[in-house]
Image: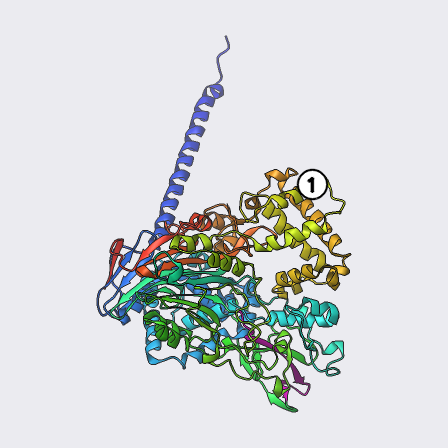
Amino acid sequence: MEKPSKQTLLEPRKKKSALKISLITLGVLVALGLIAFFVINAYINKSMAQLEGTLEVPGLKEEVVVLTDENGVPHIQAENEHDLYMAQGYIQAQERMVQMELSRRQASGTLSEVVGEKAVDTDKYFRTLGLRRAAEESYDLYSDEAKQVLTWFADGVNAYMDDAKEKNRLPVEFTLMGMEPETWTPLDSLTIGKYMAFDLGGHWERQAFNYYALNQLGKEKAYELFPSYPEHKPAIIDEGELEAASDRVDVEKSFATAIIPHAFNGSNNWVVAGDKTKSGKPLLADDPHLGLATPSVWYQMHLEADNVNVEGVIFAGVPGIILGHNEQIAWGVTNTGPDVQQLYIEKRNEANPNEFLFEDEWEKADVIDEPIQVKDGETIDYQVTETRHGPVISEFAEESGKDIVMSLRWTALDPTTELQAILEINKAKNWDEFEKGLEHFLAPAQNFVFASKDGTIAYKANGNIPIYENGDDALLPLPGWEKEQEWDGYIPFDALPLVKNPEKGFIATANNKVVGDEYPYHISNVWAQPYRYERIAEVLDNGDNFTSEDMMHLQMDQMNLQAREFVPLFEKTLKDADLTDNEKKAMDALKQWDFKDDATEEAPLIFHTWMNEIETVLYDEEIPDGMMELFTGSGQTTDQLLRKGDDAVWIRENGGLEKVLHTALENSLKQLIEEHGDTLAKWEWGDYHQVTFSHPLSEASSILAFFFNPEDPIPVGGSSVTPMAASYDTETGIVDHGASWRFVIDVKDMAKGYHIVGPGQSGHFKSKWYHDQTEDWVEGNYHVTDLKEKKGKELILY
C-alpha cells in the first residue's frame, strides 16, 4: 500500500488553517461592523430631542416646564413671555433644525452654498424675487414688542445650536450635507414667513400663460383658455405698440426654471353656529392644503404664560401659533387667492440697460448685487434689477425679449407685519380683538373663519388686495410705462368681505369665489373648482345637531361632485358611440358608482385618468409642457370647455365632444390595462393613488430613502376635488398635496382640540413621532390636545 505523501498529509491541515483564518477574518469584520453600527447608532441617537430631565438653557430668567404628550406635542409652561418664546425656539430647533435651515436657505436663495450647482437656478429665482430683502424692509415696521419676541425666539434656537455643536449632537443630515447651521436671526423667521406667502401664490404665472396664449394661439382660442371670458377682451398692450415678434418676451424660455407653487395649494375651513350643533356652541374646522412631506410643514405646540394660553400649529422657524385656539376663541384659514401679483411689461433704454420707460421718461432702476456662493464651485456674480414695479423676473434664466422684460409687482414684497398679527391674535378674547389683530396681517390674503366661546361665528377675507379699475386688467401683463396701469392702492380694511353670524347658520370656504358680482372691488379671476365648497355646503346646509365627530367625517369626505356632474354628460355623449367591450365595462362601472373616491373602487381610477387624458387630448399638441406648468387652474378651464361642448373651439378642432371623450377614454384604458391588467373589476383607485411623506434628502440615494422614508406608499381615497383633499402627481399617482393639518374644535370645551399632523411631529427619523400619524392621516384618526394637559414626558429648562 502506497504511503501518502507529506504534501497529502498537510492538505487537511492547510484547509483547516485557511478555514480558521477565514472565520477569524469574518469574525473581525462582523465585530468591526457591529462596532461601526453601535458607534453610528449612538451618534445618531445623540441628536434626538431631549424630552425628560433637566437642561440648561443660558439666558432663561426662570425655570420652564415642557411636557411632551403621547402624540409628541410639547406643552411649554413659562413664567414670562421672554422664557416662553425662548423655550419655543429651543424646542422647535430640537425637533426641526434641519427643516428650519433648509427653509431659510430656500427662501433666501442660499441653497447652492450647501447643495452645489444643482441649486443655482433655484437660488437665482429666489434672489430675484427678493423674499429676504422684503423681510428686511418689513422688520422696521414691527413693534418693539414683536421684535423682542423674534429676538427671544432666535436666542432659543441659537442656544440649542450652541449646545448641539459643543456636544456633537447635531442631526445626522448636517453631517451628510457637510455643514453646520449658522446663527439664527429674526430675519430668518420673517423670511420663512415671506416664503409661505410665495407658496400660496398670486397668479403671475397665469398672466404669463395668457400672454403666451394670445401671442401663439390667436385671440379666439386664447380667450377660451382664460379663467373667465373677458368682457372687454383686453389686449396685451395697445394695438401697434409692440408688433415685432422680437419685441415680445419669450415666456417659455424666460420662465423655464421658475419655481411655480402647486396649483392645488388651498384649504377647506368652516364654522357652524350653535343653533346647528348638538352642544349649542359653535364648531370650527380647518385643513390647510399644502405640500405633504417629511417633516410636516406644521409643528403643533401649546404655549402658556401669564397672559397667553394658546395651542395649534406654526411653521418651523417662526414664533407663536398661526392657526389654532386659546381659551376663548378658535380660528382657521384658507387661501383667498386674490390677484396680488401683477406682471408689467417694461421697455428698456437701449442706451442704458438700467433705465426703463415711465410716462415718456427714462427712469433709473435699482441694481442689486446678489453674489451666489456655490459649494465646490466659484461664486457667481449675480445681479437683480428692480423697476418701480418690482424685480425683473423674466431674465433670471437669462432669456427675454429684445429690450423688453417683465417685472413683478407683488404685495408680499412690500413691508408687512404678519407675525405681529399672529402674536395679537394669540391673545385675543373676542371677535373685536381678533379683527384688530387682522389689521397687521397683510400678505398673503387669507379667508379667516372664527368662532368664540360667546357664540360668535365670523368670516373675513383679510390682507392687502390691490384695487383694479377693471378686473380684466389682472388677466394679462400690463404696460409698465403707463401711470394709469398702476395699482390704485388696496381695498380698505373695513371694505374687505366680512360675514358675521349669518342666518343660514354656517360659513364655509374652499378657495371658491367668495363674493358675488355686486361686490364693488375686484378680487380674482382665478378661483378653485367649486366642488369641495359645494359638497361642504351641501352637508352643512342639510344637517343639524352637528358634533365634532361630524366635522371630522366631513374633512374625510370623499364625495366627488365633479364626477356627479360630468359622468352623466359623458354617458349621454357616448350613448351611440362604437365602444369596445372594455370601454363598455368602464362605462358600466361609472354608471354604478356612488361618486365617492374610495381607494378600493375602480370607478375613481377610471374617472380621474379619463379627466387627465381629456386635457392631454385638448392641449398636448399646441401647448408645450413648460407652458402647462404656467397654466394654473387648467382644470377649471377644462370644465368650462366640456360644458360648452361643440360650441368650444378647442373641442371642435379636436373633432367634437364625442371624439374628444372617446379618444381620451380609449387612451385611458390602454394606459390602465398596461399598468393594472385587463380585468377592470380588480382595479382599485388606491393601487395608483397612494400617499408617501418623502424626506427632501431621500432623493439623494436609495440608502437614505430606506432610513428617511420608512414606509411604503399607502393607498388613500379622496382627490383634489373632494373635501378629503389628496392631490397627486399624474405621472406616479403619489399624493403630494393635501390636508397638511386637520383641526376640529367644539368651543363648548375650549380646552380640547382635535388634530392630525401628517406624518408626525418629529423631524428625527428614529423618533416614535416621526411617521406615527401617517395611517391616521389616511384613515382620519384624530388625537386630542388639551390645554389642561398635566401628563407627559417632563423636561425642565433652566
Relative horizontal placement of residue 330, taking residue 534 as reference (left or right): left
Relative horizontal placement of residue 760, taking residue 78 as reference (left or right): right
Q: Is residue 86 above or below residue 538?
A: below
Depth check: give the residue in front, 434 or 577. Answer: 577
Q: Position of residue 759 (x, y in %)?
A: 43, 53
At horizontal 46% and vertical 54% (from top left) the residue drawn is 554
Quarter assignment of residue 317: bottom left
Relative horizontal placement of residue 143, taking residue 672 as reference (left or right): left
Q: Residue furthest left?
A: 62
Depth check: give the residue in front, 249 or 118. Answer: 249
Depth check: give the residue in front, 38 or 66. Answer: 66
Q: Is residue 335 above or below residue 684?
A: below
Residue of label 1: 582
Q: Which residues are magenta?
A: 337-358
Q: Residue furthest bottom?
A: 361
134 in the magenta segment: no
Depth check: give the residue in front, 618 or 389. Answer: 618
Q: Position of residue 343 (x, y in %)?
A: 61, 76
| Residue 388 visible to the viewer | yes
| Quadrant of image for the C terminus | bottom left
Q: Position of residue 637 (x, y in %)?
A: 65, 63
The figure's colour scheme reads rainbow
Tell me the SS state at disc 1. helix
| Residue 217 visible to the viewer | no
Q: Position of residue 346 (x, y in %)?
A: 64, 82
